[in-house]
Image (cartoon, grey):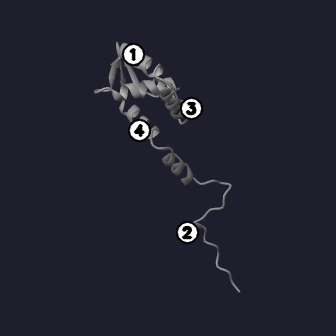
Amino acid sequence: MSFQLSILKILDGQTDGRASLEVVKQHLAILYTSGQEWTGRMKRLAERAPDLDIFGQKLVVREPGVWSITEEGRSFLAILERPTAVHREIASTEPDPDLPMTGASTRSAPQFR
């Protein structure tokens, strides 16, 4: 999946979000031979999107000779690249059924004497 994320990033970096397959291949060759930083970054992002399918999810559209990132692809990438703390914060706002609820909705019933 990190390979697909690289394609999204390459297309997102193009002025009009479009590139020929040859241009995509050239960018991929440069990125994946430039050291472990890119590979590590893509692997970390891929952990956040384990079921990614850029074509099936219509994040990238293939036209004769050209691939284009869609608005959905740009939005997906922006959300995916948010700092990890944001992802943790979002996850922590979801209720955990194993924890007691807190807040106004869980006020204890008044105790009568």
For the residues marked 1 and 4, what is the alpha-carbon distance in whole angstroms?
24 Å
Q: Residue furthest bottom?
A: 113
Q: Residue furthest front?
A: 35
Residue 108: x, y in percent? 64, 73
For the residues marked 2 and 4, what is the alpha-carbon distance in whole angstroms?
34 Å
Q: Which residue is mark 2?
A: 104
- Residue at image coords 39%, 22%: 61
For the residues marked 3 and 1, what is the alpha-carbon distance in whole angstroms?
25 Å
Q: Amino acid at mark 2?
A: Ala
Q: Amino acid at mark 3?
A: Pro
Foreground disc of the pair 3, 2: 3
Nearer to me, 108 or 21 = 21
Please tell me whether mark 2 sits on a helix, a strand or a loop.
helix
Q: Which residue is mark 4?
A: 78
Q: Which mark is residue 26?
A: 1
Q: 36 left or right of 15?
A: right
For the residues marked 4 and 3, what is the alpha-carbon distance in whole angstroms?
16 Å
Nearer to me, 29 or 46 = 29
Q: Amino acid at mark 1?
A: Gln
* Disc 1 crowd, CA 10 A, few/some/many (<14, 14-19, 20+): few
Give whichever of discs 3 and 1 has the lower sequence position: 1
Please tell me whether mark 1 sits on a helix, a strand or a loop.
helix
